[in-house]
Image (cartoon, rainbow, N blue to C red):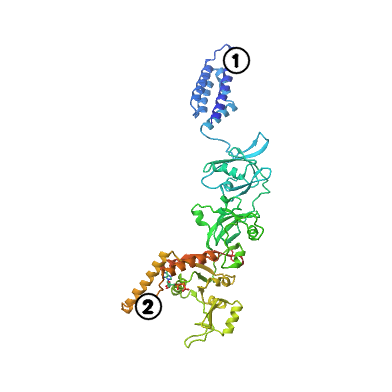
Amino acid sequence: MQDDFEEWMKALENILESITEQNLELTNRSGSHGHLTEDATCSLHNLIVSTSKDDRFCGIADQLEEIIRDCEAGPSSASLLATLLGKEHIQEVLCAADDISSSRYFPILPEIPFEVDDDEGLAVKIVKIIRQDEPLGATIKSDENGKVTIARVISGSVVDRTGCIMEGDQVLEVNGVRVAGLEPREILGLLDRNNKGSVTFKLIPGDKRKHSHSTASSIHLRALFDYDGKMDSQSPCPEAALSFNKGDILELLVCNDRQWWQARNLGNGSLATGDDDKKHGLKKVGLVPSESMLVERMTPGVNRSGTLPRISRSRGNESDSDMRYESVVRLRPSDETIRPIVLIGASGVGRNELRRRLTLAFPDKFSTTIPHTSRQPRPHEQHGVDYYFVPKIEMENMIHRGEMLEFGEFKGNYYGTAVSAVRKATQVGIPLLTPHPLALKALRTKEFMPIIIFIQSPDKETFAKTRAALRSRWSRATSQVSNSASTVVGGPRGFTELEIEQIIVASDQLERQIAHLFDARLVNSSLETSFAALTRLIHKFESHPSWVPLNWATRDLD
Ligand SMILES: Nc1ncnc2c1ncn2[C@@H]1O[C@H](COP(=O)(O)OP(=O)(O)OP(=O)(O)O)[C@@H](O)[C@H]1O
């Protein structure tokens, strides 16, 4: 602004000089004193002097126009002054001065100026970033000659949003400090000092074609392991790493890098959309290890550089532990596809109670599987209603052929649920199953496409309180019916403190091992709340698209 003011003053002084010269010339030629011109000159002079003391320029052009009008009305010397002031370039100077004083700057410049570095004759760009309390979202690398370049730009990050810093750009300066030859951590130090403030980069643009992003926004993965990016010693920029948990859905944004992909975390479970994050303004975008990088890390002898990130193997399901990510797609619910509901959880957590209540509430909607047994039928039992009664040898063959979802032996007889029983239940309604976690492997197939809901234990206090409450409600109701104050036998199970602790430990363990298989989760605290939440959850799966393994969905893609 100061520069503009000085230029403006210089321009006016030039005008004044021209007027004085013209005035002198006229006076000499005609002998006239031309006092009107002198008046105009005097007015102009006063104006300049007054505006030099006051940096509000507003209205100078207007005032001069008035002087011009006065002069035009006067003798010839005055009209000469008017001609002079009316010249196009002088008018433009006046208008420019007015524009500057009213902050009307034209033309509107592009946000980030591109300038020529006079010193080195190199085309450089200077990018100034104002950031809040968030990482810039770019990584740098330096070569053996100390040349520092932008290695990656995280999609959606502050740097990405400027649109002015690209992968491959050479970094010359950060906040006016030359970075060539500096260690990356020294460069980071330059940024840290300006945390929450502005950061200015001086860059030589890289080859855009070479570093164009390969966008992959239609690729989605389910994480089959936990990853804490901040703890990953091999991450090129832990600050820009994206952490995730087993079962989180990742949207791949950039995957042209062999080792590090950029992804957005949409949330946990098969109903994840990422919308919650948008609502809360959270940004969950960052670097994740690529599939090939994970394979390298897990291959003995390849990982020479040491510490692995916190990648937990799924001990419960070894074949899954080899797959780091599972490709998923969104499947729209359809009337033709019946997806069994599988309630999975630690024994005693309440899966069967919830199943019982659901079947009571919606008897026409859900179906259950009929178990197989090798024992003899009792007089009142019917084949295909109470059990499928099969000879022991046949049941052993079924077990060997892997046709049983789960089975056990009791008093020399086999009991269990066959895969074929789930098929049959599907013909009657939506199978509602509460199998052992080991049965998930046989169930989680393209044929059944189950919806697996983890019934999670609440904390110890809530567990004890809710179970005791149900039991005492049942006791009261029963004693009223039987009109007896004697001790009530049966009803909801009572739990010792130790049993509760064991259920919580088993629940946590199960979650750690197979959380990547859960489509959704539900904490079974009060029975009424849990039942209502489960009903809503099932309805959501029936009415919203959900993520399923890629190979399940050959049609109906969202
Ligand atoms: N939310 C709850 N509040 C109170 N009591 C509950 C709740 N859920 C279940 N219960 C009671 O806890 C006991 C155990 O529940 P349930 O039999 O459903 O467990 P489970 O997970 O099926 O385990 P298991 O396979 O060992 O039976 C039952 O008596 C049930 O009524």
Count all numbered tags in the image, as a single digit.
Answer: 2
Ligand 1, image quadrant it occupies: bottom left
Answer few, some or many: residues within 10 Å of disc 1's Cα (few below 14, many 20 plus, some between 14 and 19): few
Most foreground residue, 161 or 232: 232
Q: Which quadrant of the rendered structure holds the C terminus?
A: bottom right
From this view, report whether residue 527 is shown above or below residue 263: below
Name the residue carrying label 2: 489
- Mark in the foreground, 1 or 2: 2
Amino acid of disc 1: Glu
Residue that appears at 49% across and 24% down: 53
Q: Splitting the image into 4 quarters, where does residue 482 fall?
A: bottom left
Q: Work out whether mark 1 precedes mark 2 in sequence or the reverse, and give the earlier one.
A: 1
Q: Can residue 260 be seen in this view?
A: yes
Answer few, some or many: residues within 10 Å of disc 2's Cα (few below 14, many 20 plus, some between 14 and 19): few
Residue 460 x/y as whole percent: 42, 65
Residue 6 x/y as whole percent: 55, 26
Name the residue carrying label 1: 25
Amino acid of disc 2: Val
Q: Is mark 2 on a helix, strand or loop?
A: loop
Most foreground residue, 250 or 13: 250
Q: How far apart in space, not on screen, are marks 1 and 2 (Cα)?
A: 126 Å
Residue that appears at 58% across and 19% down: 17
Residue that appears at 57% across and 51% down: 238
Kindly tell me whether mark 1's CB lies below 8 Å from ligand 1: no
Residue 149 x/y as whole percent: 64, 45
Residue 481 x/y as whole percent: 33, 78
Q: Is mark 1 on a helix, strand or loop?
A: helix
From this view, report whether residue 398 is shown above or below residue 545: below
Identify the disc placed on residue 364. none
Residue that appears at 64% across and 39% down: 124
Most foreground residue, 278 or 437: 437
